Image (spheres, grey):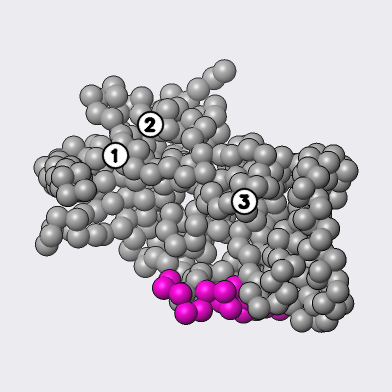
């Protein structure tokens, strides 16, 4: 298989130029089987629009000799105070904060990935060496070839990256028909679901619905926000929609993605009043379970949130999808439904200069102190 001899790296630092990448970005993603919704231009552009200022964009494009886009490193620069008064400049993947990211990555086909990673590595440690201290690749699939290729490059130079966090995304592999899925639940769980459904039916008239058109999705989203906040109001972090910026981001990305049929907002109503909702996405052959909301006072013995999730899983089977991805978090209810898991890994690399070395020593000292005081 022919590989690319050399690539040119170009940096995108403005939202105007980022906006103009939409078509090329989508064409490149189309060459990568199994990529996630969270690598799409829409998700990352609107995340950047709401959570970043213009001067923090550091998107690196890998171009071949014909100026064809073959790779994207969707980075941004975060400034923190890791060394007291000295700012620490950290390169991170777009979308890696606030919105429960998953499956972030450097974007390139497997055919070109080695050449793209090598060119990015040379650029970061030569041309851009004085512009960053840390490089954090967040929430990559543990199966991503990027991890192996990047670590290989660091080992060649006598350095290694360090894993700073791991998590998992529980999955449900879907059969082609409903009956095998129900049989796989086991007798105890089927009985529990039937009992809860009967309890809810006794409480009144129930209705399951899914918003389809952009107008329906917008109205359903307001209901989802209200239900989600009923559960989180009064708690320490206040829930996903407690702050204005995340609310604005989700509202806009829902509007944009619903126009492409990628948003799924499902509701369960009791006597015409929504008591549970699920905010999710359909992309490729996968349904992404993103965020639930429910009224904690509405027939709690019936667990309406659980019944709605069960209904949504069966709907995914009817729609011909192959996977329900429950996304980040090993909560017990997710693990009970799941038939498998995808591991996510966050890896950090240090630049080759004194400030990065000082930061590494400082972090090592902090860890040592934690060990001593435990």
CB atoms of marks 1 and 2 within 8 Å: yes
Circle 3: is it few (<14), some (14-19), or many (20+) Cα within 10 Å?
some
C-alpha span from label 1 to label 2: 10 Å
What residue does disc 2 label?
A: 150
What SS does tag 3 mark? Answer: helix
Circle 2: is it few (<14), some (14-19), or many (20+) Cα within 10 Å?
some
Q: Residue at x 38, y 31 (%)?
A: 150
Query: Nearer the observer, disc 1 or disc 3?
Result: 3
* Quadrant containing the N terminus in the rendered view: top right
Image position of 212 (left or right of 332): right
Q: Residue at x 81, y 81 (%)?
A: 272
The stretch of residues the image draws in magenta is 217-237
What residue does disc 3 label?
A: 334
CB atoms of marks 1 and 3 within 8 Å: no
Q: Is residue 357 above or below residue 301?
A: above
State the mark number for residue 74. none
Image location (x, y in percent) of residue 372:
16, 45
Q: Residue at x 42, y 32 (%)?
A: 147
C-alpha span from label 1 to label 3: 32 Å
Going from the N terminus, do you reach mark 3 or mark 2 first?
2
Q: Is residue 349 above or below residue 43?
A: above
What residue does disc 1 label?
A: 349
CB atoms of marks 3 and 2 within 8 Å: no
């Amino acid at each position: 298989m022919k590989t690319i001899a050399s690539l040119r790296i170009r940096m995108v630092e403005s939202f105007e130029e980022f906006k103009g990448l939409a078509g090329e970005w989508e064409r490149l993603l189309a060459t990568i089987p199994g990529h996630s919704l969270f690598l799409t231009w829409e998700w990352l552009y609107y995340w950047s629009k709401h959570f970043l200022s213009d001067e923090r964009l550091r998107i690196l494009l890998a171009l071949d000799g014909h100026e064809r886009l073959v790779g994207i490193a969707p980075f941004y620069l975060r400034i923190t105070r890791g060394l007291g008064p000295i700012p620490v400049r950290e390169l991170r993947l777009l979308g890696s904060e606030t919105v429960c990211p998953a499956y972030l990555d450097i974007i390139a086909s497997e055919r070109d990935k080695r050449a793209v990673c090598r060119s990015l590595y040379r650029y970061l440690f030569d041309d851009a060496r004085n512009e960053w201290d840390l490089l954090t690749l967040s929430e990559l699939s543990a199966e991503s070839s990027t991890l192996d290729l990047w670590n290989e490059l660091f080992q060649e130079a006598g350095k290694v990256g360090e894993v700073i966090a791991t998590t998992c995304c529980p999955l449900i592999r879907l059969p082609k028909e409903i009956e095998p899925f129900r049989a796989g639940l086991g007798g105890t769980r089927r009985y529990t679901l039937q009992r809860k459904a009967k309890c809810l039916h006794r409480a009144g008239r129930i209705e399951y619905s899914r918003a389809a058109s952009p107008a329906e999705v917008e109205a359903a989203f307001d209901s989802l926000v209200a239900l989600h906040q009923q559960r989180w109001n009064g708690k320490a972090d206040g829930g996903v929609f407690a702050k204005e910026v995340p609310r604005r981001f989700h509202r806009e990305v829902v509007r944009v993605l619903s126009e492409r049929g990628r948003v799924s907002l499902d509701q369960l109503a009791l006597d015409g009043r929504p008591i549970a909702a699920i905010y999710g996405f359909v992309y490729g052959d996968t349904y992404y379970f993103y965020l639930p909301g429910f009224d904690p006072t509405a027939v709690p013995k019936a667990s309406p949130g659980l019944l709605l999730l069960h209904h949504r899983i069966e709907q995914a089977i009817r729609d011909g999808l192959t996977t329900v991805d429950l996304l980040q978090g090993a909560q017990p209810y997710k693990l009970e439904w799941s038939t498998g898991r995808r591991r996510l890994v966050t890896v950090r690399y240090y630049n080759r200069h004194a400030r990065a070395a000082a930061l590494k020593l400082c972090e090592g000292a902090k860890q040592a102190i934690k060990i001593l005081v435990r």
